[in-house]
Image (cartoon, grey):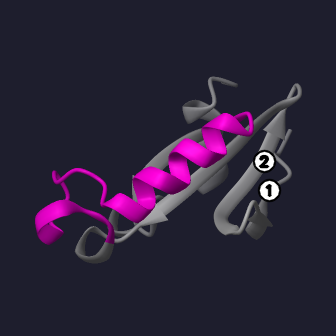
Amino acid sequence: QGLVIHQQYFVEGYFLDIFTTVNGQLFAIECEGARYHRVGGNRTGRLLGDDILKERILTQCGYKVIHILYEEWITIQDQQRWLRQKLHLD
């Protein structure tokens, strides 16, 4: 069974790249480019301040936040399957 996902879902003043809910748990999946969302502009850098604040707010609102680099996301052939695995549904 496929997940019902919403793209660019607006919540608490932020757009979530992908939003879904499973058994009442709220999930925010953030696809971030390293250049603009990571310290040093590389894939291993920590999140930048705005993204840290966004994650804290979403967590306080009951969301579980999952991060993936955009550069990786676009190479995933079966994104639904990847999401199901990340959400421990498979």
17 relative to 9 in the view: left or right: left
Residue 47, percent from left and from top: 30, 54
Q: CB under 8 Å between callouts 2 and 1?
A: yes
Residue at figure coordinates x 67%, y 60% from the top left? 18
Q: Is residue 28 above or below residue 48?
A: above
Estimate the spatial distance between the alpha carbons at disc 2 and disc 1, rounded to whole Å.
Answer: 5 Å
Residue 20, percent from left and from top: 78, 47
Q: Is residue 41 above or below residue 25?
A: below
Q: Secondary structure at mark 2?
A: strand
Which kind of residue does numbered mark 2 sit on? Thr
Residue at figure coordinates x 75%, y 60% from the top left? 12
Q: Which residues are magenta?
A: 37-63
Q: Which residue is mark 2?
A: 20
7 relative to 69 in the view: left or right: right
Which mark, by number, is residue 5? 1
Q: Please tell me which residue lies in front, 73 or 47.
A: 47
Q: Quadrant of residue 2?
A: top right
